[in-house]
Amino acid sequence: MEDLYEAYAWIAADNERAAERLLDRVEVAIDRLQQYPMAGAPRENLTPGLRSIRAVPFRHLIFYRVTGEDIVLIRLLHGVRNLGQLTDWT
C-alpha cells in the first residue's frame, strides 16, 4: 500500500521510532480486522461498502471493504484530511 510507505517516510523524517510504531499499529488493526471484519466504522458517505478503522494511537485511518470472506485494503490516510474531496476509493 503506497499510502503506508508515504506515511512511514513522512514520520521517519522526524522520528524513525514513531514511524516503526505506526507500522506496528497498522499491523495490529489489520489483525483485528481479520478476526472482526465489520469492526470498522461504515463510511457510506464516501462510497458504498467502504469502512475504516483507526491505527490507534495514531490518527491514521485504514480504509477497506469486505468482499465475501476477503478484506480489501483501499487507503491509509491521516484523519485530518478532507476525505470528502478524495475520489479514489477503488
Image (cartoon, rainbow, N blue to C red):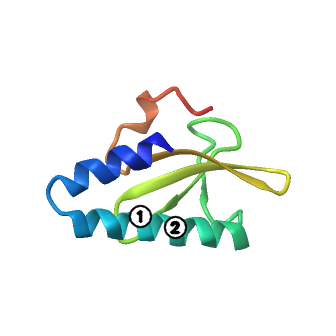
Residue lying at the far left in this picture: please name it.
Answer: 14
Q: Residues within 10 Å of mark 2 (few under 14, many from 20)?
A: few
What numbered label is drawn on residue 14? none
Return the residue found at the far right. 68
| Left or right: 25, with 47 as reference point | left
Picture mark count: 2
Q: Is residue 36 visible?
A: no
Element carrying mark 1: helix
Residue behind mark 2 = 27
Q: Amino acid at mark 2?
A: Glu
Residue placed most toward the observer, 34 or 78:
34
**What is the x, y in percent for residue 62?**
51, 54
Identify which residue is drawn at 58% across, 33% down.
89
Report x, y in % for residue 45. 58, 39
Location of mark 1 (residue): 23
> Considering the numbered disc 2 on the image, is that residue within a helix, a strand or a loop?
helix
**Looking at numbered disc 1 in the image, what kind of residue is underneath it?**
Leu
Quadrant of the drawing holding the C terminus: top right
Image location (x, y in percent) of residue 5: 39, 47
Question: Looking at the picture, does residue 34 appear above or below residue 77?
Answer: below
The percent coordinates of residue 14 (x first, y second) are 14, 57
Q: Quadrant of residue 56?
A: bottom left
Structural distance between the alpha carbons of marks 1 and 2: 6 Å
For the point 45% across and 54% down, the residue is 61
Mark 1 and mark 2 residues within 8 Å of each other at the beta carbon: yes
Front in this rendered view, residue 63 or 85: 63
In the picture, measured across the screen, residue 49 lies left or right of residue 45, that is right
Residue 65 visible from this viewpoint: yes
**What residue is at 24 percent from the left and 70 percent from the top?**
17
Above or below, 63 relative to 39: above
Residue 65 drawn above or below residue 82 = below
Name the residue at 52% across, 67% down: 27
